[in-house]
Image (tube, rainbow, N blue to C red):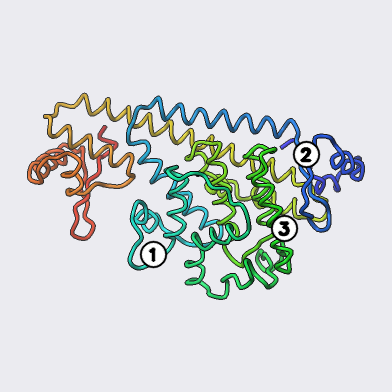
Amino acid sequence: MEYLSLFKANYINDIDVKKLYDDRLNSMNTVHFSIKIHDNPSFLCINKELTVLLEEIQFLNNKIIQKRFDSQIHLIKTWELYHSLVEEIMISNEIEGVVSTKKEITELINIEKPKEYKRFYGMVKKYEDIFFQEKEFTPISDTSKLRELYNDILLVDIQRDNPDNIPDGVIFRKEIVNVVSSTKTIHRGLYPEIKIIEAMNSALSILNDNSLPCIVRAAVFHYFFCYIHPFYDGNGRLSRYISSYYLSKVLDPIAALRLSIACKNRQKDYYEAFKITNDVRNKGDITYFVLQFLDILKTGLEDYLDDLTDKVNQYHYYQKKQSQLDLDHSSRTILETVIDYTLFYLEPVTLTKLVELTHLSKSTISNHLNKLEKDGLVEKSKHGKNCLFHFKKNAL
């Protein structure tokens, strides 16, 4: 990163930190915010580095959309659902030390409300809204709407894990909360609740201010939300969801659903950006955080484009390889289905599912699977009473 934070400038002897601060604070290209950071007015410098990052993010976003369109693979959307959405939720939990498994998240996808509440159900449903884009985008207009979102996504899970962490104020928390690393307090959220509400209303105004690019607003709000720290628990997960929700306005939904994954892959940079921006010596300059946030988002899109390209290449490779095999029509249909399921659903396929997908009888499929097993193309395993089938990649 080219941008020098005021925090780091303090340790460079030949820099006049006061002049650097005054120049940045009073520049025509500086955006000022009403929220104070340690009694310092907060501000953002709109510089060349920021505009280049925005351009690079949009370029990568367009490449992802084009790559998906060019692939002409109808199951790509399925793979993105089980690859990106499930992983994003798992990773957002993991960043906060909350353990979740691929199985429990996957089981909640595309299901109606269960009779008995299942852990993470609220979070999965909200992330599905981003993925499927079937509901009209509704801005989070005020603190009451923010609290409703918290209730929908996190309240039941937090209540089950630790009832002491349920919000106990009018909207947010009424007690002091410290962010602790090991045994050291690294940040203290705003206090009392009246200050939290006032600051959060200001942060939401920034988030919905169309005079700034949406991606920049998402980054700015992400910082302020975590600085304010309105809840006892769930701040990180909720702030990342809101960022993804707003990013999905201007980016491909799957690109927007790579934020937690990108933050986890660059977790040191992610935490460092908060640490530097929170420091009193940084004097309210949130530019470093915004640039780091955008750069993390950019690398997340780069990584996803690589994943998408690999998946498309794998599909076409195995399509070509299996087309060269001497198979009858039924065997080829079954093998193609097993390959597709393994590649895009990311798990083996059951005999029942093969009947549903191929419209062949169970006995026909079983006979052909036995032959494909003997030829070393398909491998069978057992899970309880179910037989699971996946194709042997090395065979092709």
Q: Is residue 269 above or below residue 108?
A: above
Q: Which of these two is toward me, 289 or 30?
A: 30
Q: Which of these two is toward me, 69 or 100?
A: 69
Local crowd at mark 3 within 10 Å, few (<14), some, or many (≥20)? many
The residue type indicated by label 3 comes to: Ala
Q: Which residue is mark 2?
A: 45
- Whether residue 47 sits left or right of residue 263 in the image: it is right
Q: Which residue is mark 3?
A: 199
State the image coordinates of residue 18 (x, y, percent, origin top left). Answer: 91, 45
Residue 101: quarter of image: bottom left
Camera-near label (2 vs 3) is 3
Q: Residue at x 14, y 29 (%)?
A: 327
State the image coordinates of residue 152 (x, y, percent, origin top left). Answer: 49, 60
Looking at the rendered structure, the secondary structure element under dot 1 is loop
Local crowd at mark 2 within 10 Å, few (<14), some, or many (≥20)? many
Q: Which of these two is toward me, 136 or 22?
A: 136
Local crowd at mark 1 within 10 Å, few (<14), some, or many (≥20)? some
Q: Is residue 258 visible?
A: yes
Q: CA distance from mark 1 to mark 3?
A: 34 Å
Q: CA distance from mark 2 to mark 1?
A: 44 Å
Is disc 1 in contact with disc 3, using a CB cutoff of under 8 Å?
no
Q: Which mark is residue 118?
A: 1
Q: Residue at x 33, y 36 (%)?
A: 75
The residue type indicated by label 2 comes to: Cys
Q: Is residue 75 above or below residue 109?
A: above
State the image coordinates of residue 179 (x, y, percent, origin top left). Answer: 67, 64
